[in-house]
């Protein structure tokens, strides 16, 4: 198979009490599993695309044949989004950001609290299913955006530094319809080390080289 479901980097129950084990099991095994299965099934019709990464497929959706474009957009996006999501969380995560991400947040949003408020607000206001992101622009700056369904900022020429999943399946068993409560609690499991790795990848491609660095 061209694409595989990545293993969770921790136990299903590792993010309790923020995210319950049953949600993790369903979310990873069933939902993410289905995106991978559907993506592979679509690519069977176009073997020449099977060697491309899911990121490359969704980076230029116009290059994907029309008969599978919507399927690749939804399921390729779902695969990319969730592969990131599991990694940017960890047991005993959270706390204030450190390292380069702390500097970027301070420079762009003033302070972490204001950034959190804006990020959570964008996530709460995303109508229906979708994601809220801190995304990097080609200029090297960052912005908060939300996307519908499984759309990823990569399709808009942006770099997903990190994002939170606001599909109901990400929180409904524990938080029911209280999405803002989930958004607020989620910061307790964020993995800033992984976020800094992603930021580093973004900056190495988009930041002007600074002397003496």
Image (cartoon, grey):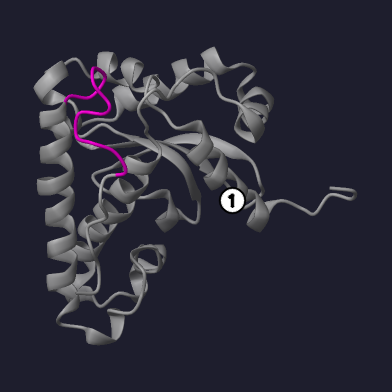
Residue extending farthest right: 212
Taking the image as drawn, is residue 151 in sight? Answer: no
In-image side of 27 versus 52 (left or right)? left
Query: Would residue 185 be found to the left or right of residue 192 on screen?
Result: left
Q: Main secondary structure of the magenta part?
A: loop
Label 1 neighbourhood size at 10 Å, few (<14), some (14-19), many (20+)? many
Magenta span: 9-20
Q: In the rendering, at what x and y percent does residue 25 appear?
A: 13, 38
In which quadrant will I find the N terminus?
Answer: bottom left
Residue at (9%, 47%) from the top-left corner? 30
The quarter of the picture where residue 104 lies is: top right
**Vertical placement of residue 157 versus 110, above or below:** below
The answer to whether residue 67 is visible is yes
What's the residue at 17%, 24% (across, down)?
20
Asked whether residue 90 is drawn in magenta, I would say: no
Q: Position of residue 10 (x, y in %)?
A: 29, 38
Which residue was labeled with disc 1? Answer: 202
Q: In which quarter of the image is residue 125?
A: top left
In the visual, does 162 lie left or right of 44? Answer: right
Q: In this view, does 189 lie to the left or right of 172?
A: right
Residue 173 in which image quadrant: top left
Give the residue displayed 12% in from the left and 24% down from the top. 172
Q: Where is residue 111 in the image (x, y as percent from the top left)?
A: 61, 16
Residue 162 in the image: above or below residue 42 = above
Residue visible at 24% across and 30% down? 127
x then y, percent, for residue 187: 40, 21
- Residue, far bottom: 48
């Amino acid at each position: 198979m061209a694409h595989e479901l990545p293993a969770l980097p921790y136990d299903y129950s590792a993010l309790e009490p923020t995210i319950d084990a049953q949600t993790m099991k369903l979310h990873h095994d069933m939902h993410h599993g289905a995106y991978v299965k559907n993506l592979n099934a679509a690519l069977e019709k176009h073997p020449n695309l099977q060697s491309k990464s899911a990121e490359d497929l969704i980076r230029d959706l116009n290059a994907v044949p029309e008969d599978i474009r919507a399927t690749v957009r939804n399921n390729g996006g779902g695969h990319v989004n969730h592969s990131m999501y599991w990694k940017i969380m960890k047991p005993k995560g959270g706390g204030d950001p450190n390292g380069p991400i702390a500097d970027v947040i301070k420079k762009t949003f003033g302070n972490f609290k204001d950034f959190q408020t804006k990020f959570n607000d964008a996530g709460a206001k995303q109508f229906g299913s979708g994601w809220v992101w801190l995304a990097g622009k080609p200029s090297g700056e960052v912005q908060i955006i939300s996307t519908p369904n499984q759309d990823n900022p990569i399709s808009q020429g942006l770099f997903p530094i990190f994002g939170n999943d606001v599909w109901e399946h990400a929180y409904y068993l524990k938080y029911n319809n209280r999405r803002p409560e989930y958004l607020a609690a989620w910061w307790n499991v964020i993995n800033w080390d992984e976020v800094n790795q992603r930021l580093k990848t973004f900056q190495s491609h988009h930041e002007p080289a600074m002397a003496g660095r």
